[in-house]
């Protein structure tokens, strides 16, 4: 096991006519060219005064029972189950969680599809509009089993629009691209990208992280409420440690509400998983809480690109697969900022070596090569006061002792260590709480510049010897009633 692990420093609701399509655009970022696509009003506002509001389709949405889309991405078929008991479904995505809001909105939008204007009533040449041999079509099947097929052509002279005509007709319309984007996209765009729901009630459970670059497991669990310092969770592997919630919350709770940036591959084969680095993954995040259990598998990284398409050192996302979540059988591309488990180290998220508040303790025994100092004290958090401190029956300056205890709490915890430690400690600190609990911290010489630390009998940390040198100096300063050094 690697004993030289170095922690690193931390780092709408949408109106009926256009709602579903625009909500989809917001989710995917595939806007037609305007930064303002937050509602259907944004599309309406872009229609100039010359708009003719040319009706193309005028139906009740319930009359459309199927939309068959063909496009350069392969197309898909949206079906409305005749029973009405099942949600609108993309046939090719059956079994996967789907963006029902987008699909429902698609039906609504198509039922009242309207053109910006009629370009030609009877075009002699459809080719000039990209409508003669287009790969982009959609066909509606209606309740009476009749069908209507439409062709989507080139981008119009007004670039927010595309040309459209009904199959068999030479009447050409200009239609807002925002109303056609779903038919121009891929079926993968219609997969719901929220992978994991909110945190379940009834306790935290257990989170385990394994990675290829770590020869140990990092695990987090709940701690008894009366023992919690700031965070209700603690690290239990590879060492026991309290957490700094400023940095730990993304690691301990980041899986709840996890959302992918894109669906890369539906129903992947083993070969496809291998292609994306998921057969020999970078790492895994396993969570279990009662009946809830899932694993996030992290595969290959995708680097950010510069303006010329050249890869940068910065990682933009990772390809991932999630086991244990129904309807998520896909390879996902997840933004790097949503996957802290890919890079964090234990030292990034842990806090105090010992977390006992000074008001809760009644004794601190410090044994060094020069002897033992037995301090007793009394205080109360409600009064925010330490009433007195004594050492071997003699009064000790309360403020100076508080400075010594503050220094002990300042122990740097970023470098963990959990190999076997031999020999005897040269400093031992035993902290006893009023309730009988406490901590025992032992320091062992390792080299001229490093000291190894056991916390409650378990190898836990490595620290620079200058910290213990300053600790010893501060003990002497306290005995002499002199000001203590704040930093090692």
Image (cartoon, rainbow, N blue to C red):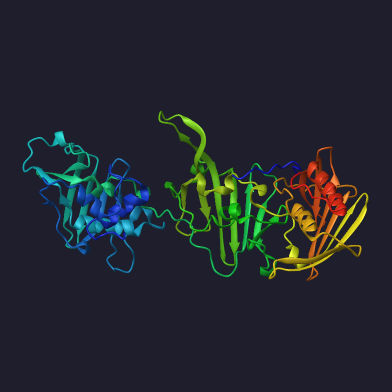
Residue situated in front as seen by the camera: 243 or 251: 243
- Residue 139, x across and y down, in percent: 21, 51
In screen coordinates, is 26 left or right of 383?
Answer: left
Above or below, 383 against 366 in this view is below
Q: Position of residue 89 (x, y in %)?
A: 33, 59
Residue 290 image-quadrant placement: bottom right
Q: In the picture provided, is 49 more to the left or to the right than 486? A: left
Q: Is residue 362 in sight in this rendering?
A: no
Give the quadrant of the N terminus.
Answer: top right
Q: Is residue 474 visible?
A: yes
Q: How many marks overall? A: 0
Residue 132 image point, x, y percent = 16, 37
Nearer to me, 238 or 187: 238
As rendered, which of 71 and 218 lies closer to the eye? 218
Query: Residue 190: horizontal and vertical position, in percent?
Result: 35, 52
- 264 or 390, nearer to the observer: 390
Q: Is residue 331 above or below residue 227?
A: above
User: Does residue 198 appear left or right of residue 459 in this picture?
Assistant: left
For the C terminus, the quadrant is: top right
Q: Quadrant of residue 380?
A: bottom right
- Asked if residue 457 lies left or right of residue 318, the reply is right
């Amino acid at each position: 096991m690697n004993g030289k692990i170095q922690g690193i420093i931390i780092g709408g609701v949408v109106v009926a006519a256009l709602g579903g399509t625009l909500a989809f655009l917001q989710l995917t970022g595939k806007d037609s060219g305007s930064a303002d696509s937050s509602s259907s009003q944004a599309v309406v506002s872009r229609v100039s005064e010359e708009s003719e509001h040319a009706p193309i389709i005028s139906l009740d949405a319930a009359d459309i029972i199927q939309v068959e889309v063909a496009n350069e991405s392969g197309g898909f078929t949206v079906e409305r189950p005749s029973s009405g008991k099942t949600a609108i479904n993309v046939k090719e995505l059956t079994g996967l969680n789907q963006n029902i809001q987008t699909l429902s909105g698609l039906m609504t939008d198509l039922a009242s599809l309207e053109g910006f204007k009629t370009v030609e009533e009877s075009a002699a040449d459809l080719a000039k509009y990209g409508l003669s041999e287009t790969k982009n079509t959609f066909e509606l099947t209606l309740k009476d089993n009749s069908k209507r097929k439409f062709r989507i052509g080139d981008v119009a002279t007004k670039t927010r629009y595309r040309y459209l005509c009904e199959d068999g007709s030479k009447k050409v319309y200009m239609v807002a691209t925002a109303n056609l984007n779903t038919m121009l996209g891929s079926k993968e765009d219609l997969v719901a990208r929220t992978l994991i729901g909110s945190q379940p009630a009834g306790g935290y459970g257990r989170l385990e992280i394994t990675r290829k670059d770590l020869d140990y497991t990092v695990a987090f669990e709940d701690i008894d409420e009366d023992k919690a310092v700031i965070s209700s969770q603690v690290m239990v592997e590879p060492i026991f440690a309290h957490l700094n919630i400023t940095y730990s919350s993304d690691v301990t709770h980041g899986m709840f509400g996890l959302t992918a940036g894109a669906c890369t591959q539906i129903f992947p084969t083993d070969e496809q998983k291998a292609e994306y680095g998921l057969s020999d993954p970078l790492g895994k995040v396993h969570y279990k809480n009662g009946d809830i259990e899932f694993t996030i598998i992290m595969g290959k990284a995708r680097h950010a690109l510069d303006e010329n398409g050249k890869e940068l050192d910065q990682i933009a996302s990772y390809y991932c697969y999630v086991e244990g979540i129904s309807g998520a059988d896909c390879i996902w591309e997840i933004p790097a900022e949503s996957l802290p488990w890919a890079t964090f180290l234990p030292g990034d998220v842990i806090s105090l070596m010992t977390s006992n508040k000074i008001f809760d303790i009644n004794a601190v025994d410090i044994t060094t090569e020069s002897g033992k100092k037995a301090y007793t004290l009394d205080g109360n958090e409600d009064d925010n006061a330490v009433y007195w401190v004594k050492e071997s029956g003699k009064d000790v300056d309360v403020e100076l002792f508080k400075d010594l205890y503050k220094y002990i709490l300042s122990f740097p915890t970023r470098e963990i260590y959990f190999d076997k430690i031999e020999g005897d400690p040269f400093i031992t600190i035993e902290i006893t709480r009023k309730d009988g609990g406490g901590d025992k911290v032992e320091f062992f010489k390792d080299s001229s510049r490093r000291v190894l630390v056991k916390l409650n009998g378990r190898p836990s940390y490595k620290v620079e010897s200058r910290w213990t040198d300053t600790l010893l100096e501060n003990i002497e300063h306290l005995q002499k009633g002199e000001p203590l050094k704040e930093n090692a």
